[in-house]
Amino acid sequence: MSKRALISVSNKEGVVEFAKELEKLGYEIISSSGTARVLRESGVRVVEVSEITGFPEIMGGRVKTLHPKIHGGLLAVRDNPEYMQQLEKYNIKPIDIVAINLYPFEETVKKGADLDEIIENIDIGGPAMVRASAKNHKFVTIIVDPEDYQLVIEELKEQGQTTLETRRKLALKAFRHTAVYDSIISEVLNEKFEINEKFPQEYSIPLRRKEILRYGENPHQEGALYIKPTEQEGLRVAESEILHGKQMSFNNYLDVEGAVNLAKELDCEENVCVIVKHSNPCGVAVRKTQKEAYLQALKADSKSAFGGIVAFNKPLNLETAQELINLFLEVIIAPEFEKDALEFLKEKKKNLRLVKIKNFNKKPKGFDFRRISGGLLLQDRDLQLYKELKVVSKRQPTKEEMEDLIFAFKIVKHVKSNSVVIAKNKASVGIGPGQTSRVDSLETAVKKAREFNLPLEGSVLASEAFFPFRDSVDEAAKYGIKAIIQPGGSIRDKEVIEAADEHGIAMIFTGMRHFKH
């Protein structure tokens, strides 16, 4: 029985060489339309699908491979006598090797095609053949990735056939390939059809591996980074460009995400610097120059900044780079790196990771995902800051205090709950993250301010959630804090406001909390 290979690919990379090698090994090559033309022009003998089926391609190529003479050849179980008798009865020949990659749906969407063109690039026959071949992997070798051509050729040359282990691996890869393909289609069409069903009954997430990480959260855990091929227009930390330094770890990426989101949150024309450690900001400042912003952010907690991550909202310049080398840092993040700054850091710090973020100035899109045992939590991203700014105290905040209050509230939104942020002159003075009591968070922030000799008198305080009791206000007054911003909404709001009035503290309600777990 002659050996046959069916080749039909949109990605023509390496396909001519692959087909020629199969020809040398005695395979008859079956193909259709565009692939057949490319192979034939390169000197490969090709049998068209229409010659096999006895039926022409119709409807502009929409119907060509969905035929018993193709799918019978793919699905026939070779050690089943009844199946083989049916092949003989209907003059169907088995197909042994299948190389298919699908219509370029994703690429069509990315180039901004209209809906009709997008729909036309939904492959039907391709996935059917891929799945049929993968189902019958005991006898059929299915290839969906040009990277696997060489492996298949080597095994055919060495053993005359592919191994069952290889066929299983390729079948599994094929099923994953079609699953991601269909997931991308469902996500794109949900948007294009404007159905906007936010939480459908069934939901699949297309993911494509970008890299194996150095390790997970800890060295004994393995980790990998996957990218979501949809949502191309938003902030893309997952597709950041590593310009220099060691391979990124799981924690590095989490910290980069947090640092970039906070830097973007501040959203100002001046220079922003954010220093992050273990997913929490430990120093934040806005200044006229980048160097000043970094040095001011560092003042807030130079101890925690050791081994931390620093993010800037503008291209990193040489003057700032020369300051950065004085502290051990894991990662430096910027939308761009000026040439002399990049060369300087590469020369001075061999392992320091320099990360350029894709779409730095755009908002992230899609859901916020959180994994739990046996399931996944989905929620909207926290992209709002407040519903309104309502002064609830007798004393009105000054213009400068109001600017600092909004600045501090933007920071506290990105700090793990329970949290408070003390700020003054658009710089963090003390940050209290992740305590089980808000008073404890305040004490942590005050402790940090005192440790680094930063002035508490005349500062402002932001809380990401309401004060359940007046105790935090009383404590804040002891340290000279003059204004507080918080969501409000506690059953004890009245006594909290009374405490602010007793101490002459201006208090603002935002009407929106920002728990971060």
Image (cartoon, rainbow, N blue to C red):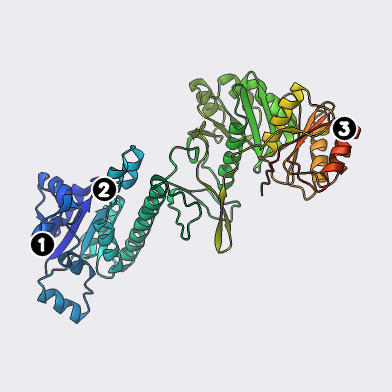
Alpha carbon of mark 3 to alpha carbon of mark 2: how far? Answer: 67 Å
Three-letter amino acid code at the position of disc 1: Ile
Alpha carbon of mark 1 to alpha carbon of mark 3: how far? Answer: 86 Å
- The correct choice, above or below, for 368 with respect to 449 in the image is below
Residue 359 is tagged as none
- Is residue 307 among the parts visible in the rendering? no
The residue nearer to you, when weighing 138 against 222, is 138
Residue 479 is tagged as 3
Viewer-side label of 2, 1: 2
The residue nearer to you, when weighing 494 against 368, is 494
**Mark 3 or 2, nearer chain start:** 2
How busy is the neighbourhood of tag 3: few (under 14 within 10 Å), some, or many (20 plus)? some
Three-letter amino acid code at the position of disc 2: Glu
Residue 120 is tagged as 2
Q: Secondary structure at mark 3?
A: loop
Residue at image location 29% in from the left, 51% down from the top: 122
- Horizontal side of 393 relative to 137 (left or right) equals right
Residue at image location 36% in from the left, 51% down from the top: 185
The answer to whether the residues at label 2 and label 1 have Cβ atoms under 8 Å apart is no
- The correct choice, above or below, for 240 with respect to 141 in the image is above
Alpha carbon of mark 2 to alpha carbon of mark 1: how far? Answer: 25 Å
Three-letter amino acid code at the position of disc 3: Tyr
How busy is the neighbourhood of tag 2: few (under 14 within 10 Å), some, or many (20 plus)? few
Q: What residue does disc 1 label?
A: 52
Viewer-side label of 3, 2: 2
Q: Secondary structure at mark 2?
A: helix
How busy is the neighbourhood of tag 1: few (under 14 within 10 Å), some, or many (20 plus)? some
